[in-house]
Image (spheres, rainbow, N blue to C red):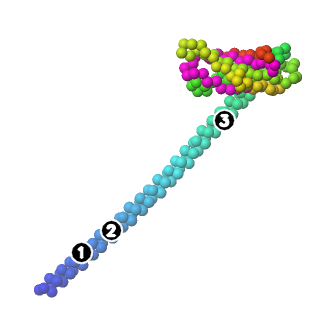
Amino acid sequence: MLAILMAGYWLGYRQFLSEQAQTQSQHQTATHKAQAQIASLTASAALLTQQVTILTSERDALAQAQKQAQQDVAAMRETLSFFESLLQSNDRSRIASFVACDLQPLEPGKFRYRLLLVQGTNRTDELLGRLQVNLQFQADGKKARISQGQAPIIKVQARHYAKLEGELTPPAGASNLAMDVQFFGEQGNQVLASCQKKI
């Protein structure tokens, strides 16, 4: 009787061990499958991230190319306007004259001036002198002025024409801006050319 009980216990124990081994094998198989799925999803996510990075770089490159193209077009228009101004300038009697006098806002509190000074068409000597740029404005209910070209001096030395530009920085909130530009000869304070621009 005892032998039968022992045999039954042994058989049950072996069956239990077999079932445990089978369960553990199933768990391992499921774990391997889950790890494989995680690895596959990780690889897919890395590929998508790489594709997004490439697309973003291509988009930025296209945006930069568009910006450069717009700058090139603006430069071509400016050059065309420059030569048109030269063709329209027919004042033969004056030593020099401004055929372009522009003042444009760059950002709040900063403005860029662009000037085109042209030599008289009957002149063959070199264009020599100095430039003075004055900006009048109203700030805090009072009139004020800032100037460029006094200290230091803005020297001008060119033949036929001179393209001049610079930046002016009136106080924040300044209004009623009026630019007055004067070109003086190399000697003395004689004004040879002047122009005005209001914005």
Q: Report whether 95 appears left or right of 135.
A: right
Dividing the image into 4 quarters, which one contains the C terminus?
top right
User: 68 or 173: nearer the eye?
Assistant: 173
Sequence-first disc among 1 and 3: 1
Cβ atoms under marks 1 and 3 closer than 8 Å: no
What is the secondary structure assignment of the residue under circle 1? helix
Whether residue 126 is visible? yes
Question: What's under tag 1, amino acid-wise?
Answer: Phe
Question: What's under tag 3, amino acid-wise?
Answer: Ala
User: 97 or 5: nearer the eye?
Assistant: 97
Query: Which quadrant holds residue 134?
Result: top right
Question: What's under tag 2, amino acid-wise?
Answer: Gln
Sequence-first disc among 3 and 2: 2
Dividing the image into 4 quarters, which one contains the N terminus?
bottom left
* Residue at image mark 2: 26
Q: Main secondary structure of the magenta part?
A: strand
Query: 10 Å neighbourhood of mark 1: few (<14), some, or many (≥20)?
Result: few
Query: In the image, residue 44 lies at what x, y percent?
Result: 47, 55
Query: In the image, residue 43 lies at what x, y percent?
Result: 47, 57
Q: In this view, does 136 lie above or below 83?
A: above
Q: Report whether 106 appears left or right of 90.
A: left
* Residue at image mark 1: 16
* Disc ID at residue 141: none
Query: In the image, residue 178 lies at what x, y percent?
Result: 64, 16
* Residue at image mark 3: 69
Residue drawn at (73%, 17%) of the image: 182
Q: Report whether 15 appears left or right of 65.
A: left
Residue drawn at (17%, 81%) of the image: 8
What span is colored magenta in the figure?
164-187
Q: Is residue 131 above or below residue 68?
A: above
